Image (tube, rainbow, N blue to C red):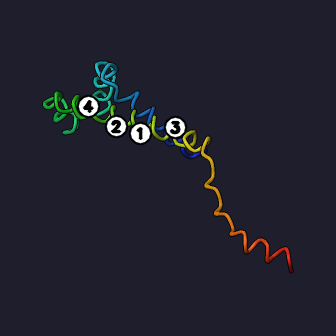
Amino acid sequence: MFWQKIRSGVMYVVAFVSCPCHLPITMPLFLVFLAGTPAAVWITQHSGWVYGILTGIFLLSLALGFVWMGSPDEKAGEVCEPRPNRSISSVSTAKNK
């Protein structure tokens, strides 16, 4: 249960970083760290694809965060399966012994 909360928390952080509403701020900051590298050139030339892929990552990580956060709660209200009843003849023979 503890690790599920950590996994979901990591997914929420990934969702926050890749959120489309934050990308106009985070993308230039990310490009500053990559300045002078071929990766920065490729990202600036294909920024539309990068925005689309990061939006997909946002949706996937947000969904996984919700699923992993809700996993323990689904089993909290479950009722155990009833045990099969013993036949009456086996109970009566056990009492006679």
The spot of residue 13 in percent (x, y) is: 45, 32
Q: Which of marks 1 and 3 precedes in the sequence?
A: 1
Disc assigned to residue 64: 1
Q: Which of marks 2 and 3 precedes in the sequence?
A: 2
Disc assigned to residue 60: 2
Q: Quadrant of residue 82?
A: bottom right
Left or right of residue 74: residue 20: left
Residue appearing at x 16%, y 27% in the figure: 48
Tell me how far mark 3 sits from mark 2, CA to CA.
Answer: 14 Å
Q: Quadrant location of the C terminus?
A: bottom right
Q: Which of marks 4 and 3 precedes in the sequence?
A: 4
Q: Are marks 1 and 2 in contact (CB under 8 Å)?
A: yes
The correct choice, above or below, for 12 with respect to 28 in the image is below
Q: Mark 4 or 2, which is nearer the eye?
A: 2
Residue at numbered disc 3: 69
Tell me how far mark 4 sits from mark 2, CA to CA.
Answer: 28 Å
Q: Quadrant of residue 38?
A: top left
Residue appearing at x 52%, y 42% in the figure: 71
The spot of residue 39 in percent (x, y) is: 21, 38
Residue at numbered disc 4: 35
Q: Which of marks 4 and 1 precedes in the sequence?
A: 4
Q: Mark 1 or 4, which is nearer the eye?
A: 1
Within-10-Å neighbours for mark 2: few <14, some 14–19, many 20+: some
Depth check, front residue: 26 or 8: 8
Q: Are marks 4 and 2 in contact (CB under 8 Å)?
A: no
